[in-house]
């Protein structure tokens, strides 16, 4: 099952996506030019093999719900996310707020 929900983060609207798979759930929240995701996200791959795409993304581990993803500190972020001031340790909600305010 796939669930897509609008989320109000401060004065911006983001989109939460939950994908129920056998033995796991994929979680993502997107706004503006980027997204945050659960531990399934491979930040190293995005930074190395897909570098030319400039993907703005962050990864939080150990989360099981969209709310946990928003509340968790990001474990890692892409180089493109760092260029927007998004850093590892930042709460997911703050990263989404910054993404929503980014001009792209």
Image: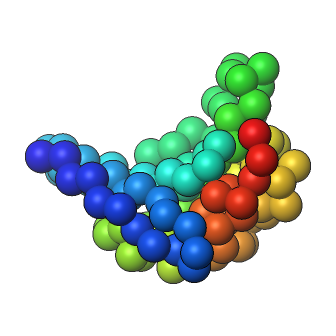
- The quadrant of the picture occupied by the C terminus is top right
Q: Describe residue 77's horizontal placement relative to residue 9 as left or right.
A: right
* 94 to 4, vertically: above or below: below
Q: Position of residue 10 (x, y in %)?
A: 57, 79
Q: Quadrant of residue 95?
A: bottom right
Residue 81 in sight from this viewpoint: yes
Q: Residue at x 33, y 52 (%)?
A: 17
Q: Residue at x 66, y 73 (%)?
A: 94
Q: Position of residue 11 (x, y in %)?
A: 58, 75
Q: Residue at x 39, y 75 (%)?
A: 67
* 93 to 40, vertically: above or below: below
Q: Describe residue 17's horizontal placement relative to residue 100 as left or right.
A: left
Residue pushed farthest front?
11
* 36 to 92, vertically: above or below: above
Q: Residue at x 77, y 47 (%)?
A: 103
Q: Position of residue 93 (x, y in %)?
A: 57, 73
* 83 to 48, vertically: above or below: below
């Amino acid at each position: 099952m796939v669930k897509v929900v609008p989320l109000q983060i401060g004065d911006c609207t983001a989109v939460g996506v939950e994908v129920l798979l056998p033995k796991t759930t994929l979680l993502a929240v997107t706004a503006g030019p980027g997204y945050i995701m659960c531990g399934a996200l491979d930040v190293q791959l995005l930074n190395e093999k897909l570098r030319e795409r400039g993907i703005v993304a962050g990864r939080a581990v150990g989360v099981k719900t969209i709310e946990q993803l928003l509340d968790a500190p990001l474990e890692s972020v892409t180089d493109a996310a760092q260029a927007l001031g998004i850093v590892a340790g930042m709460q997911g909600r703050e990263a989404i707020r910054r993404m929503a305010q980014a001009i792209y």
